[in-house]
Image (cartoon, grey):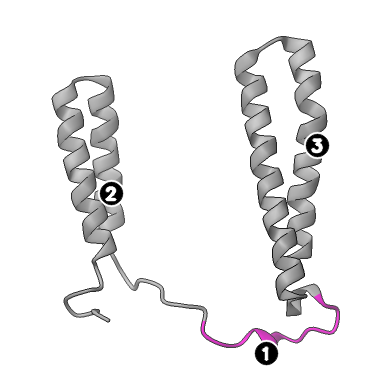
Amino acid sequence: MKVEALVFGVVAVFLAVVTPIYWFASNDPTGTTALAVTFGLGAMIAFYFMLLVRRLGPRPEDRHDGEIEELAGEYGFFSPHSWWPLMGGLAASVVFLGLVFAWFILIIGVALAAIAVIGWVFEYYRGEYSH
């Protein structure tokens, strides 16, 4: 995690330097706000990774004497197949179409998005892959 913290820290420092320069050079509030928010997000991620480095210690890929077999073990559960992300994407597209064209399409899209989220969350509570 030390390398990841360093990468995001360098990004945050770069944006901390570039944001005021951009503000003075362009006087553009939108771009300045975007750069400031990006700096904040990069700094937050760097801070979180620094906390993880301190709490977890070095990982095998961070050490020079680390071996491949040290990473063996279970990585978690990954869905073998799921149609709910597709349904969520379609529902999001209906929501955005509703924002553009008409409020009743927006309501339909929000209802479809709620169904997609509920289906995605409770996908493994019943059926063949239930836990």
Q: Is residue 128 left or right of residue 2?
A: left
Question: Residue at position x 67%, y 90% from top?
Answer: 69
Q: Is residue 21 above or below residue 115?
A: above
Furthest-right residue in this view: 64
Write the start and end of the magenta stretch as one range: 63-74
Q: Are the residues at dot 2 and dot 3 in contact (C-beta closer than 8 Å)?
A: no
Circle 3 Cα neighbour tier, 10 Å, few/some/many (<14 / 14–19 / ≥20)? few
Foreground disc of the pair 3, 1: 3
Distance from the alpha carbon under mark 2 to that under mark 1: 38 Å
**Residue 71 painted magenta:** yes
What residue does disc 1 label? 69
Measured as percent of width and height from the top left, residue 46 is found at 72, 52
Q: Assign a secondary structure to mark 1.
A: helix
Name the foreground residue: 33 vs 129.
33
Distance from the alpha carbon under mark 3 to that under mark 1: 37 Å
Name the foreground residue: 80 vs 110.
110
Furthest-top residue in this view: 27
Q: Assign a secondary structure to mark 2.
A: helix
Measured as percent of width and height from the top left, residue 41 is found at 64, 42
**Residue 112 painted magenta:** no
Tag of residue 14: 3
Q: Quadrant of the C terminus?
A: bottom left
Looking at marks 3 and 1 on the same chain, the residue that comes earlier in the sequence is marked by 3
Q: Quadrant of the N terminus?
A: bottom right
Q: Is residue 65 above or below residue 110?
A: below
Q: Is residue 60 above or below residue 92?
A: below
